[in-house]
Amino acid sequence: DTGVSQNPRHKITKRGQNVTFRCDPISEHNRLYWYRQTLGQGPEFLTYFQNEAQLEKSRLLSDRFSAERPKGSFSTLEIQRTEQGDSAMYLCASSFPVMGTEAFFGQGTRLTVV
Amino acid sequence: TQLLEQSPQFLSIQEGENLTVYCNSSSVFSSLQWYRQEPGEGPVLLVTVVTGGEVKKLKRLTFQFGDARKDSSLHITAAQPGDTGLYLCAGSSNTGNQFYFGTGTSLTVIP
């Protein structure tokens, strides 16, 4: 399978715990995006990388959210001190760094904070 | 912030009917994508339109990009229950740095 892969698919955590999600993009894609999606809404942009450089992170929801892509391949999204409002689907997508190219999404990680 | 608005937000139709979903913005996009998403899954790319006025057909689905590249429509002919899902439009900025998603249209096709 050469698509975008996200792990885990589901995560249930207690409020206050830290969680980390992983995304493996399509191997030829330089760009990697993280989105958050709540029920019935369109995905909300969080951050993106070109190779290992995080070029936009101002849309991360708070300083509890951070993302890394240390070697320009897979990426991780960490949420510290989770809150119930963090419950959502977290989506990763990748694309070529060409203007107007399309993004391909993974299956997402469903986070539930109890 | 660029914003894409989709209409209608919800649509429930009988199998065999036709429907059109609209995606509108005040901003110009270098390209626009349509995705379909099923519950618990990530969005799946249906089509990308790039040129103003472009029309693309994918079996029973017809996609159109507005002449000014600010809006798009998705028309489904003879809808089937398998078409049920959340339809999302997404615009790519001129720098290609972000994909701005629409608010989504939840389609239910009743057998």
Image (tube, coloured by chain):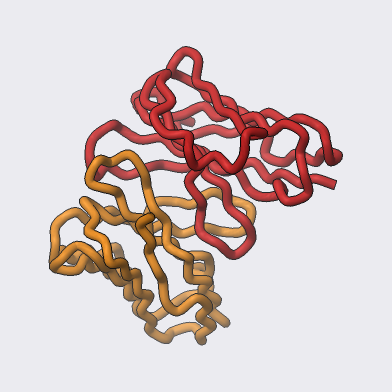
Chain colours: A red, B orange
Given residues B33 and A44, the one toward you in this image is A44
Residue B63 visible in this rendered orientation of the protein: no
* Image position of A15 with respect to A25: above or below: below
Q: Looking at the rendering, which quadrant does residue B1 occupy?
A: bottom left
Taking the spot 42% from the left edge, 62% from the top edge, the residue there is B102
Farthest top residue in view: A71
Taking the spot 70% from the left edge, 46% from the top edge, the residue there is A86
* Image position of A103 with respect to B62: above or below: above
Residue A44, how many percent across, how many down?
A: 51, 51
Residue A32, how many percent across, how many down?
A: 43, 32
* Image position of B107 with respect to B54: above or below: below
Q: Specify whether B17 is left or right of A65.
A: left
Q: Looking at the rendering, which quadrant does residue B20 occupy?
A: bottom left
Taking the spot 77% from the left edge, 44% from the top edge, the residue there is A83
Residue A101, how many percent across, how many down?
A: 27, 42
Q: Specify whether A20 is left or right of A103.
A: right
Count every numbered label the image shows and give the total: 0
Residue A73, how many percent across, how many down?
A: 46, 19
Given residues B95 and A7, the one toward you in this image is B95
Taking the spot 51% from the left edge, 80% from the top edge, the residue there is B11
Residue B19 visible in this rendered orientation of the protein: yes
Given residues B94 and A30, the one toward you in this image is B94
Q: Specify whether B5 is left or right of B49.
A: right
Q: Specify whether A74 is left or right of B34.
A: right
Given residues A65 and A90, the one toward you in this image is A65
* Image position of B53 with respect to A81: above or below: below
